[in-house]
Image: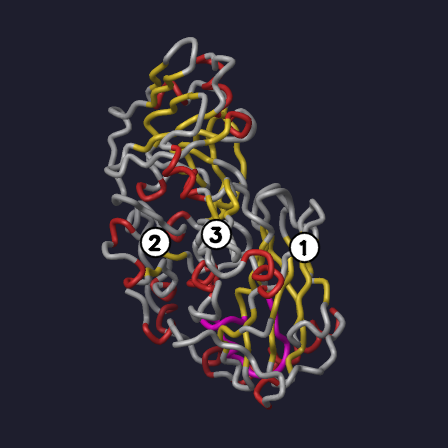
Amino acid sequence: MTDPNRLRVPAAPRSADPAASRRAFLTGSLAAGGALVAAAAARASTGAGDPAILEIPDWTRYNGFGVDEYPYGVPSPYEAHVVRRNVPWLTAESVSSINFTPIHELDGIITPNGLCFERHHGGAAEIDPAQHRLMINGLVDKPLVFTMDDLKRFPRENHVYFLECAANTGMEWRGAQLNGAQYTHGMIHNVMYTGVKLKHLLDEAGVKTNGKWVMPEGADSAAMTRSIPIEKAMDDCLVAFKMNGEALRTEQGYPVRLVVPGWEGNMWVKWLRRLEVGDEPWHHREETSKYTDMLADGRSRRFTWEMDAKSVITSPSPQAPILHGKGPLVITGLAWSGRGTIPRVDVTIDGGKNWTEARMSGPSLDKSMHRFYLDIVWDGSPLLLQSRAHCSTGYVQPTKSELRAVRGENSIYHNNGIQTWYVNEQGVAENVEIS
């Protein structure tokens, strides 16, 4: 269940008042890297008289657990709060609902398997892999049925990709709503998938010249189906059976799922049981509604599959306040794009008056998350934190005002506007809007 203290739904959209004293911008200068290191070291030295280091703790007085205590490793009990969370009022039933990755608690770019967000339409199917089959039919020369062992005989590949629900940040279209990065941006995860190219399987079956679309179907009770253009299916889609080196989790589609890099998560069909090739999208009316974003003037954007460049500061944020007071502060977050890599992220601490290029750390992979940092010395003044992602295509993440000027407020999908956190003098952060 969601902690009600971490979730706030105001009666009307919030907007910051630049004239208010609590919105005073931080005007302190950003320190150089060497000075930051020195400041951090000086702060650490103040702990010399700490009884936690002077006294022998209990856990050094007895043996810990043995190697056979946890055949499958579990996190430390002191990390028990790092879990996925649901928002109960989003849906009537949890079997057709969403939970959220605790991105504010994570670092690097890889999401642990047990924390990857879930989206179900009929609950997570529990499938015996020995009994599972994948069929390819329709406009093919040779309909085929694969066992899991058959699939694993094809050349396999490893790729790190993000998976983002198209409704991620969808509640924020009309103003600041959910108070926490986990809730505003947590319908996303980033893992290494192991599988075989969908192209290999389609080539084995032989796609006819009039085969223009592929319909993947899931083995869950919802029989989840989507339509994918043949060009995408033959490009970089994977039929994956492992994530981060181990078998898919049940909730992530065990024993096999579809991976559609850079495209919205509802197309990544889990518990994959069938791939039908056809000459047009299936359930044409239904597909149109699922791949459509309403605009302000009543028109619609159709087939909006690709996920635009986006970023969010994960700490400090409403669920990750500044606890240590003034001094060295690491501002960090995530950025990603469904069209390429993220070569640059800018960060502002004064609501957009001044921007500083953040430090990127870790691998820069196509259609994957990127980790960024900005190291400052915080003087205790209020902060208005934002991040702005640059895609390798040249696209720059827009402000919410820029996005709404084009898209209006009628959609719940594809909201990639710049997120703002206000941090007060006590280090407590909240979700606000300034543009």
Quarter in which the C terminus is drawn: bottom right
Q: Is residue 377 visible?
A: yes
424 in magenta: no
- The mark closer to the camera, 3 or 2, is 3
Three-letter amino acid code of the residue under disc 3: Met
Determine which residue is flagged by label 1: 396
Q: Position of residue 18 (x, y in %)?
A: 62, 83
Q: Residues within 10 Å of mark 3 (few under 14, many from 20)?
A: some
**Dot 1: within a 10 Å radius of its alpha carbon, few (fewer than 14), some, or many (20 or more) residues?**
some
Quote the CA–CA distance across marks 1 and 3: 22 Å
Q: Secondary structure at mark 3?
A: strand
Examine the rendering and report whether any part of residue 247 can be seen. Answer: no
Pointers 3 and 2 in contact (CB under 8 A)? Answer: no
Q: How many marks?
A: 3
Instruction: Write down the quadrant of residue 221 in the picture.
Output: top left
Quadrant for the N terminus in the image:
bottom left
Residue indicated by mark 2 = 98
Q: Is residue 46 above or below residue 242?
A: below
Quadrant position of residue 433: bottom right
Q: Indicate which disc residue 294 carries.
A: 3
Query: For the magenta stretch, what is the residue range?
Result: 316-331
